[in-house]
Each structure stands twice: as structure tokens, then as C-alpha cells.
Amino acid sequence: MLVAAAWIAIALASKIAAADVDAQIAAIREQLTRLEIERALAGVDALLARPDLPEASRVVALDLRAQAHVASDDLNAAVADYRAILELKADYAPSRELTSKRAMDRFAKLRAATVGTVRLDLDPRDAALTLDGRPLAARADGSFDALAGERRLRATRAGYDPAEVAVRTVAGQETLLKLSLVPNARGLIVRTDVEGVAVALDGAAAGLTAKPAGASSDAPAVLLLDAVPMGEHQIRLSKSCYADETLQQMVSVDLADRSPLSLAAVSLRPARSRVVAIGASYVGELRIDGERAGQVPLESFSMCPGTRRVEVVSSGRVVWAGDVVGEDAETTLDLAPRPNVALVGTAWPAGWSAAASTWSARTGVALPQGADLGRSEGWRAVALPPATDLAVAVLPGGGPGGAERVVVFSPLLGRAEDAPRAPAPGPPAWRRGSIGVTLADRGATSVIVAEVAPGGPAAAAGLLPGDRVTTMAGKAVTRAAAARALIEAAVRGETVSLEIATPSGESRRVSCTALSEPRRDGSSAVATGSPAMVAAWASAQAAAGGPDAAPALGVLASLLESESRSATALDAWRKARAVGEGALAARAAYALGAAAQGEGNAKLAGSLFESARSEAESAKDDALAFAARDRLADLGVGAR
Amino acid sequence: MRRSAVVGPIVLALLAPAARADDTAAERQLRIAQRLAADRSPDAAAAFQQVVTLAPRGRLADDALAGLARFNGAPDWPEELGRLDPRTAAAATTPLERILAEYPGGDHAAEARYRLALIRSAPLPGRDAARARKELIDAANGPRDTWTARARYALGVLDERTGESERAAGEYARVLVDQPESDAAARARAGFGRTRLAKGRFGEAAAWFQAAVEAGVPGEVRAEASRELALAALVRERAPALKWSALTTIPASATARGAALIAASPDGAMATYDRKTGTIQITDASGASLPARPVEDVSAIAFDPYGRLFVATKDKLLRADGPNPAPVGTLGAFAAPTGMAVDASGGVWLIDRRGDRVGRWMPGATEPSVVREEKGSGATALVAAGGGVVVAEGKSGRLVAIGGSGSVVPLGSAVFRRPAALSVDAAGRIAVLDEKEETLTRLSASGEVLEVLALPAVGVSHPVALAAAPDGGVRILDGSSGSIAVAP
């Protein structure tokens, strides 16, 4: 840190000094223009007295002083300055416009007596030169001027050993010199059958192969590696979706042929990672890195190795998105629909990472300053990506005691809500296990079978209303809610074992095979998460279709309805009517009927309510059947 | 007390007449009023009024009037109507009517319409059930909010209490389907359960009561007791051997000498009258005895659906649920009635001493009016059921149902030799005490015989009166011992 500061200080000081020198030179030039010779000379002397004066500035200062001396007709002094200049810059010549003929003659004599010319035959011609340690730029014909005497010429170039020779220069004469550098490296031309291949030489990136301009389409792509030192080198070729290739190449120098060594064209082998897809039973389009890659439903797909952006689009929106790492070994990916959740800010709330891993997460949305994100109106200031199902924001210091406050916003429901706890990972349970019984508490510790669904597993096992459930799955049953939770947690086909006592006192064990049935309303699904969260999952699920789309649509429509999002709720009910059956279809018909009733279309409303009533009765949904009957009575149809 | 003393000066300072409408001052005043109301301070009413005075056209004026109505006792739910008295009802009505008259487009109009309709349906003088129903229908069809759900629920309760059980089921179902997340939904679940109970569909009823309890329905709805009743009935249907075979007995109190009357409240309280001591003994829902209330010459006692105890003497009708029985009317031709029942509208049904006439006293009336007169019919007992009453007639030995409008239809075909007492439970099941046969018979709501209990066989030697507890059990008062046998 200190070193860096010192370096910066020095650089700054140098810059200031250089600016100062330039200003002084400009002032001196101005003084000379105004023929203030004495002041100009004093200024030059002061400048030349500075020990830190750069060599180029010293040449300029000496040149100005020579001009001053010429102007004051002090040619001897001018010649002394010319001499000092030539020692620094042998190819110097005073400006003819500013110098008198006499002075020019004196300079020509001086130059002829002190400067010679060297004509250099240099191989390679682009080698860098120094003369007596000073950088030297030779003329196009290879010649350069030098003070007479013994000089040290040094030539360097990448790929060659440096060379240094002594040159004896004679004033007023031309000296011939030949200097050939000995190569120690060679150019390599890497060639690949596809272009855009990244080439690394000994681990260092060297560039990409490219088709030469005008080359035919089947011509290899090339990359010139200049001045590769002698010896063995490793060349690694890599390109997305191709297997890496590594070449070992020995580089030697041929003094007779210094052209780059062209390597044989390498054919890269395409590489694919196999991904087994689960949960992809709906209809959609698979996209990898934005390109169409397949049609869902599918059981597996392949993709280029490395990290890929995988998306599934269904019903015009992304229902699954994530970065997937393709590996050599087969990987498994759950493509079940999931919500697009935008993070507003920089980091997920503490403890949310498990849930976030089950979403199609979007980041990079800035937290707006000054907006009250605790209220839905405040979210108007947030530019959310399209098809965002849920947004999560962490408001620093907005919670109790200055803790962070987490707010989620559902664009669907137009609802912002606090989220004090991390949500459970994964989707809400659109379905639940069932054995076709309704349980009720009797007294403090008894659980009675209140209803048995005709034809259901419980009925098949011989359960009857009035039976008391004493144990379930080996555990004593004392509360209906707990017993129901056990049943709802059962998956389809699972055996639920119960021990029951009949009203007459007989005990027996029964086993029921659980069914999986859709949840009938939104409230029970909502119980597993916030409305905003459940709506987000439901939206993705509903868009994807598939087996859970109908219950998800029902839940979504109920949530939209409860938030008075009438138009979108109605749209959801229409879809639910199309894909649902039984109680859900009846409920959808009821909602559509209510909308028709609200619009004054009594005929359509009556027809829909009648459908709702009849379907609800078939599905044993008493409340819905009664509600539809009551709606019909409102329309003057049917007896109550 | 201390709190009132602290806030008193603030209230008085803000009660000074305002020079101009000032929304800021009104807002401050409303906050004070709300705090006072939460503390049940008597200053709250004036504080609410002052909000309106400060800014009569301001946005908070109707908030203040709504707050005032609530503070004055405007009911939240139909189950609370029994708590209203005429003075409270008037105090709550005034601000609510002002809201509708002066702020009809405000955000409290729906609330005012709903609460006013509830007050109109309360068992009070001037009750106007038809208008209340019309206004509730109007409120229930308004823009969807908490008041539409409550109004729909209240319609169900009104329908249920007039015996329109299926119509009530439709109203409750509308709450459950249209607004399942509303605060009325838990009550509607219980209400729907009651309609299933009335149909004798005990399993379904139990399931709905269970759902209501799990949804957090308040205790005043009595869903748990109804669930017990439904499940007990369900279990008994399965096991005929269990039918009324196991009676328990509540021993007579130490002071009982001539217990003759019994009545049970929907909340589980029970009242008995001892003719020899001239006292009414009340035990609350937990079984604790309250201080005896001396009342002379009592001939009938009955609880109404709100838990208010009515007492008929030789010439007066009293309310005896408070510590001091208070007269509410005179009995006129129905002096010393032999039977009494009270319905949800506040109507007190009576049988005259000779058993020839059935009459009804309505709140605010000076005397009962005759609903049915049939000389020699020998009416002995009656219970409120389905918006009217069921009467036991000694001459024919039959039961007849008298509707609210006075219509009379036989109930079932069972004939009793001397039907002396009746009770009705929450499922509408009627228990008939036949003194001659010494039996207790349970009938369904439609009059079918469900079960018969031979009383001597279970040790009840001198049954004189019946009452149904909330769980459906029948209390049989033994006149000789003063004990109470409980037939579950």
C-alpha cells in the first residue's frame, strides 16, 4: 500500500514537473518571439541548470538558447550549444526558418566534423535498437547518424537472442554494418476444423481461431502464435459443446526457414451431457441458452457441458428456469413447473436459500430508494422482469428492533405482504391423501367417523359412520385434526392402517389404500403458505398444465377472487372449467354463473348455476350445491 | 376509574365548539374516542360526537358515527341480539341511520345497513323481521366485502329461526362458496351443520361442526355442543342397544322440596322452580349454582334461544336471567299458564290454565293474543320449534305444530295417553313425557317415533317436567325427589 502511494506520488510529481518544464519552454519561446533575448537566455540557463530536466527537453532548451545566441549574433555560443545538442541527438538540425545562413554554415561545419553515418543491414529488420543505451530509430534505409567515435549498438527482438556490437563512427563518413540476430523461437499456426476455438499456450490464453478472410467454408480456422520459444509446449484447445483437446508441440528453430510452423488441423469432438428429466410431464418447449432444444414432455435431453441456462416455456411463459451444470456423468433434473421469483436487492433473506433453490430465481433487480415496499402501491417503482410470479425484497432495518424486514409481492394478486419466516421449499400440496372418511372430535379424546364416502377406500374396508378410531398407523388417535393430517400425508396407494371400535364395543383393525384427491378450495392450500407464495406456485403450475393444473387453477382462481381481481379470477375459472372435473368444474361453473348474473345475463347464469348444482351434487359437494340452488332462487328458478 | 380521570380533561378540552371544520383535529379526536371506547369509558360517546361536530363533512365523520354505534351496543352478529334492550337499540340506531342519511356513499354505509337490519330483527318491541330480511338481502348483494358475508350469514340465521332450514342452508352455503375467507365463514359452517342436523343427517352435521370448530368459530355459536349432539345421535343410530339405557342422575339440591318446573338454556344453563320454597334455582353451563331467586306463584319457565329466562306467574310475565326478576308484560287471559315457550323473535307462547287456548305475547304488547282456541283440547305443554310451537293436546293425545302465522298441522301419528311435558333439542327432536304410560318418547322433527324409554325401569318414579340440554340429552325432573335424570 505504501509502495503504491509512493509510486503515485512520484508519478504525480513527474507529471507536474513535466508540465512546469513545458510551461517554461513556452515562455522562453514567447520571449524570443518578442525579442526579449536577455530574459530568454536567463530562462534557458535556469532550465538547463535543473538536474531533473529530461533529455528531450534539454535538447529543446539548448536549441532555444542557440536561437537566442544566433539572434544576438553570438555564433560561438550558438555553436557550443549545437555541439552539446549533437552529443545528445546526433541527427539534430536547427530550424532553417529561425536560423541565419551564417549560423547554418557554422552548424554544417560542426556537424561534418563530429557526426558520421552508419548504414545498418539488420536481420530481422524490425528489431529494436539502442545506441549507447539510448533508443535509436534508424531511417527506412537502415541508416542513422552517430557522433564520431566508439559506439555500442544493441538489437533486441522477441524470438531472437539479443546482440550488441561496437561501432566505430567516423565524422563525415558512412560506416557499413551488418547485424543478424540469432532466432530462439518460432511462430506456430494452430488450425482447427471449427472456428472460435480458444487456444491456451502453456496455460495462458492466446486467442481464438478464426477463418481467414476469403477462405472457403471448409478451410480450417487458424490462430498464429508468434514467437513461441524453443522447447516443448502444451497447446490446449477448448470450445463450448466440444471436448477439450491438448497438443504437445516441440518447437525448434530453423535458421533457413523462419516462417511459422503450421500445425495439422485439429478436428474437435462434439461433447454432450445427458440430463434425465423428471417432472416434465406437461407440454412445453425446452430452451438451452435461449435456443429451442426440445419439446416437453420428455424423459431426458442432452446439452453442452458446462453451465447452461435451461428454460421451459409453456403457455407463452417460462415455467421453469435455472442454470444447469452439464457434466460427463448423467445428471437428473426436476423440471416440474415452478414460479419465477425475482430478488429485489442483492441477497436472499437469511434462511431462504432452501426455498429459493426450488424457484426459478431472477436476480439483478435494484431495490428502489424511497419506495414503501411494505405496501402494494410501493411496488410500482420496481421494474420486475416479465412473467414474474413473486418478488422478494429485504428492507434493511425495516423489521422489529431494526432487524431486516422481508416483504414479498405478488404481481398476480397485487398484494404485498410481510414474510417473517422463510417459506417451505417446494410447491404447496395441490393434492392430499384420502381414504374417504370425515372425522370429528367427540369429547376430549375420542375421534368418531362422521361420514364415509360411498365407494371409497374406507367404505370398502367396512368403516361406518359412528365408528371410533382408536389408533392410526400404530399411534393412538385422540384428535381428529391430527388423524386427518396423517391421512392427508399419505401418498396414493399407501396403506393406512386403523384400529376402530364400533358403537357396540367391538374392536377391529382395517387397512385402507389411500387415494390422492385434489384439494377442493384455496383455503387449505393457503394454510401451507402465504397467499402470495401459493398464487406464485399456482400460476406456474396452471400455465404448464399437467395433472396438477386443475387444482392449482382452482386455488389460483379462489385467491384472485378473494383479492377482488375479478377479471383474472374469471379467466382462471374459465380454464378450470375446461380442465377440471367434478367439484372443481362445478365450482368454476358457479363462478362463471355469478359473473353472468352480475352482467345481467340471467339465462346464461341460470344455465351455469344449474350445471354447478347438478355437478356439485354428483361430486357430493353439498355446500356448493346449496349455494347454486340459492343463486337459482335469486334468479327465480327452481324451488328452494 | 383512574383512566377516566386522566383522559377527562382532554375530552372536555376537545369538546369546545370548533370554529371551523378541521380534519386534523377530527382525526386526533377520533383517536381519542377510539381509545376511550376500547376502555369502555363513558366519555367515549361524547368524544365520537365531537368528531362529527369538528368536521361534519369530513372523511372521518362516518367513522366516528360507526364507532359510536358500536360503542352504544350495535350488534356484530345475530347471536348477540338477545343482549339488546330497547334503550341500547335506540342508541345504536341513531348514528347508524345518520350514516345512511348523511353519508350514503361512505365506506360505512354497508356496515350501517347490516347493523340496522340486525337491530330490526332483534326480539324487541317494534321488531320488523320482513324489513330486516329485505335490508339484509340488499346488504348481502352489495360489493363483496366483510358486510356482504355477514349479511348473508345473518339471512341464514333469520331463515333458520323461522323454520326455513333449507333456505338457510343456501345462505350459509353462499358464504362458504363466495367468501370462504370471511369472518362469517366459520359461523356459516356451523349454521350449515345446524341445517343438516335439522334434517337428521347427523354425520354430515358433525363434520360441519368439526370444520366450524377447527375454523375457530366463537363459543356463542355452540358448535362444539352441537357436534356432541350430532355424534351422540350418530352413534345411537348404530347401536340400538344403547338407546336410553344408561341414565345418570343429578341429585336434588339440599333445599329442594317441591321441584315442579325445569328449563334448559342453549348455552347449557338450567333452571328449576320449587313451588314449595317459591324460588328459581339456576345452574350455569359449568354446573355452578347461582343464588336462588324468589318468585311467587310461578306456573311456567322457559329459556329463549338467546339464553334469557322467562317466568310466568299467576298474572305477570317476568325476565329472570338477571339477579332481580323484572316484569316485561301482563298475562291477561293467560294468567298462570300451564305451558310456555319463547321463540327467536321474542314471542312468548303460552297455554292458558284450562288448556283451551294457545296464545303469544310479543315484545311491547300489553297482553298475549290468542293464536289458537279449541275448547276441550286439553293442551298441556308446548315447545318452540321451526318458527312456531309444537303443542301436546291431552284430549287427542296427539302433537300439533302451530306455525308462526297460526296454521295448525298434526305432527306425526304418535298418540299418547297423557302427554304432560315436552322438550326439543337442537336437532329438532321432541321428547314427550307420557304420565299415564310412564314413558319418555323421542320423536324426530317430523314426528316419527325414534325411541321409547320406560321410566320406572330406570328409577324415575314421578316425572313432572322435561328440558333438552345443548348436547341433546333430556333432563327429566322427578317431582318426588327433586332429582334430575339425564337421558342422553
Image (cartoon, rainbow, N blue to C red):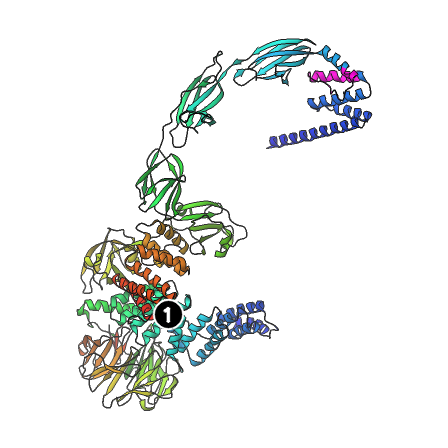
Report x, y in % for residue A569.
Answer: 38, 58
Within 10 Å of the Cα at label 1, are there few (<14), some (14-19), or many (20+) other Cα atoms? Answer: many
User: Which kind of residue does numbered mark 1 sit on?
Assistant: Arg
How many circles with numbers are drawn on the protein?
1
Q: Is residue B87 magenta?
A: no
Q: Quadrant of residue A74?
A: top right
Name the residue nearer the viewer: A628 or B254. Answer: A628
Report x, y in % for residue A449.
Answer: 24, 62
The magenta span reads A76-104
Residue A538 visible: yes
Report x, y in % for residue B291.
Answer: 36, 79
Query: Is A164 on the left-hand or right-hand side of B466?
Result: right
Q: Quadrant of the N terminus of chain A?
A: top right
Report x, y in % for residue A604.
Answer: 33, 64
Up/down of A268 relative to A104, above or below: below
Name the residue nearer the viewer: B349 or A39. Answer: A39
Up/down of A226 relative to B250, above or below: above
Q: Is residue A83 magenta?
A: yes
State the residue position of label 1: B152
Which chain hosts label 1? B
> Which residue is depicted at the point 74% across and 15% down?
A83
Up/down of B126 relative to A162, above or below: below
Q: Quadrant of residue B385?
A: bottom left
Query: Is A97 on the left-hand or right-hand side of A330?
Result: right
Q: Quadrant of the C terminus of chain A?
A: bottom left
Name the residue nearer the viewer: A191 or B122. Answer: A191
Residue A527 visible: no
Dot 1: what SS?
Answer: helix
